Image: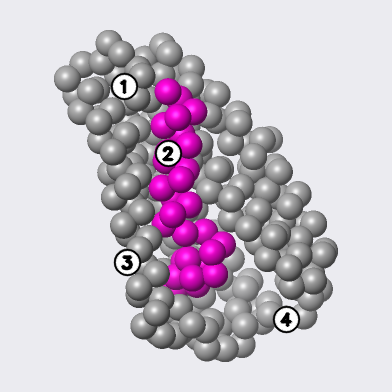
Amino acid sequence: MWTAEENRHGDLLNKYLYLCGRVDMRQVEKTIQYLIGSGMDPRTENSPYLGFLYTSFQERATFISHGNTARFAKGYGDLKLAQICGTIAADEKRHETAYTKIVEKLFEIDPDTTMSDFEDMMRKKVSMPAHLMYDGQDNGLFDHFSAVAQRLGVYTARDYADILEFLVKRWNVEKIEGLSSKGRKAQDYVCKLAPRIRRLDERAQERAKQGETCTFSWIFNKEILL
């Protein structure tokens, strides 16, 4: 069910891009083909604990990013794109709800392992599924794409910190008791991590002021401010 819904999201956005006529669909399709070939590495190591922790975070991230895109699209008068992204955001929210409930149960029945894996996931950093994307030209495509998303406010380091704080509160991480020494250290780490991530957001904002640019093949090699 989950993969079927995610596939529909991609199909819908792909059709929008094709019909709007504003992008180089050949380059978009090349990027998709390369990405499918490269796959993804969420670094969950075949662990169901890490898998559900990852998807809890990732689904909230996509809920936020699609929601922000919908808001921006509406502000620029593209009501159809706003409707599309709003619908996708609602789907992502439902996915988030399902996965966070599963992790809530994991904390209930095996708090020590879940806490340690939560720390492990956050130390490795949560990468988005498209982090290996390539268009045949730009070896740093995802980093450049992320920089633009950061500057525009589609998805930022501040959002990353907010998601972490939301999940810590959602799972009552600070109040979980009966942990081993390793579990308590993990608990302390994840509960204190968000302020450190926000400092990264401040540095990203400073970097955006430097005026670096990059061309994107998707939009006919137009130069964009990072």
Mark 1 lies on a secondary structure that is helix
**Marks 1 and 3, the one that precedes in the sequence:** 1
**Which residue has dot 4 on it?**
22
Seen in the picture, residue 40 relative to 120 is either above or below; the reply is below
Pinpoint residue 39: horizontal percent, then vertical percent: 48, 55
For the point 41% across and 47% down, the residue is 161
| Badge 3 amino acid | Arg
Q: Which residues are magenta?
A: 144-172
**Marks 3 and 4, the one that precedes in the sequence:** 4
**Marks 4 and 2, the one that precedes in the sequence:** 4
- Name the quadrant containing residue 54: top left
| Badge 4 amino acid | Arg
How many marks are shown on the rendered structure? Answer: 4
224 with respect to 80 (left or right): left
Instruction: Judge whether residue 11 can be spotted in this image.
Output: no
Q: Nearer the viewer, residue 27 or 104?
A: 104
Query: Is residue 175 inside the magenta stretch?
Result: no
- Identify the mark at residue 113; answer none if there is no mark: 1
Pinpoint residue 69: horizontal percent, then vertical percent: 65, 61
